[in-house]
Image: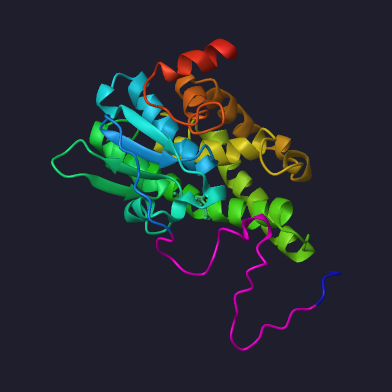
Amino acid sequence: MAEAEYAPPLVWVWDKTNGGQFASINRPTAGAQTEKELPVGKHPFQLYSLGTPNGQKVTIMLEELLATGHSAAEYDAWMINIGQGEQFGSGFVALNPNSKIPAMCDHSGAQPIRLFESGAMLLHLAEKFGAFIPTSAAGRAECLSWLMWQMGSAPFMGGGYGHFYHYAPVKIEYAINRYAMETKRLFDVANNRLKETRFLSGDDYSIADMAAFPWLGNLYNGAAYGNTREFLELEQYEAVGRWYDEIFARPAVKRGRIVNTAKMPERHSAADFDAVEAAEPT
Ligand SMILES: N[C@@H](CCC(=O)N[C@@H](CS)C(=O)NCC(=O)O)C(=O)O
């Protein structure tokens, strides 16, 4: 290892400059930093998000629900620009005290229900609509196990591997090795499972797949973190590739992946997709 040794002081002190491209937005305290209310549209679900893998999980689920006839899942999706610190506005923090996208509010009942954490949103929607979650106790347990596996593993892939391999201003061999190993191990876990079953929970496509697809998929297809597909030799995970291709082809997935991106900063109705799909036919 070529890096200079670092001796931690007795008490850690925050160095504002030491955060790479996130230095200007992240700090070691929680809470609102500005007063800013959130817009509220006319649909039952109000989503405040960005088209990152964690954001895509929820827009894929909402589009899948709409595609299967659950019109009560109509939603307005508002873009939260995390690069400009919009996750620290008072309205957003009232929904998510953790200041991370996605955040959602369910206005379908007598009182609005706030939701933070993408996994909680997937489960809330699956239970509310009785969709994309197995009904048997064993099937449900398997689905929730894979959902929680994904929620627990994303920080190793994103905050660990992605941060140190792609974003960190210095390339630290120890950190990259540590998280590259863990990311490959996680791909192997998914690959072994998908050699045995069509989807993560079993025979049926579920919220576990919707959670895992944007993460495994964006690394597998080369979209995330520079040269990662080659660096981690991801093409060897063939069962993940077979699963990726099947999910990628779903029309609702194609739609969910573009919400809250530059192609569609906000989404308020199915008609919003017409212009995008006309420009880029699927
Ligand atoms: N466990 C959370 C993670 C959410 C998360 O990390 N969101 C990132 C974008 S993908 C974010 O908002 N980052 C802004 C920040 O760290 O200030 C979830 O799945 O909802």
Q: Which residue is most to the right? A: 2
Q: Nearer the viewer, residue 127 or 48?
A: 48
Give the left or right position of residue 138, taking residue 271 as reference.
left
Q: Residue at x 26, y 38 (%)?
A: 127
Image quarter (top left, top right, bottom left or bottom right) of the C terminus: top right
Report which quarter residue 105 is drawn in: top left
Q: Nearer the viewer, residue 191 or 17?
A: 17
State the scheme by which the image is colored.
rainbow
Is residue 202 visible in this depiction of the protein?
Answer: no
Give the left or right position of residue 7, taking residue 73 as reference.
right
Rendered position, 28 above or below 251: below
Q: Residue at x 67, y 67 (%)?
A: 17
How far across and how far down the image is residue 196, in percent?
Answer: 53, 35
| Extent of the magenta region | 5-33
Q: In the rendered structure, does residue 29 fall within the stretch colored magenta?
A: yes
Image quarter (top left, top right, bottom left or bottom right) of the N terminus: bottom right
How far across and how far down the image is residue 197, in percent?
Answer: 50, 33
Q: Which residue is most to the front? A: 35
Give the main secondary structure, helix, strand or loop, of the magenta stretch: loop
Q: Nearer the viewer, residue 41 or 170?
A: 41
How far across and how far down the image is residue 162, in percent?
Answer: 66, 51
Q: In the rendered structure, does residue 247 fall within the stretch colored magenta?
A: no
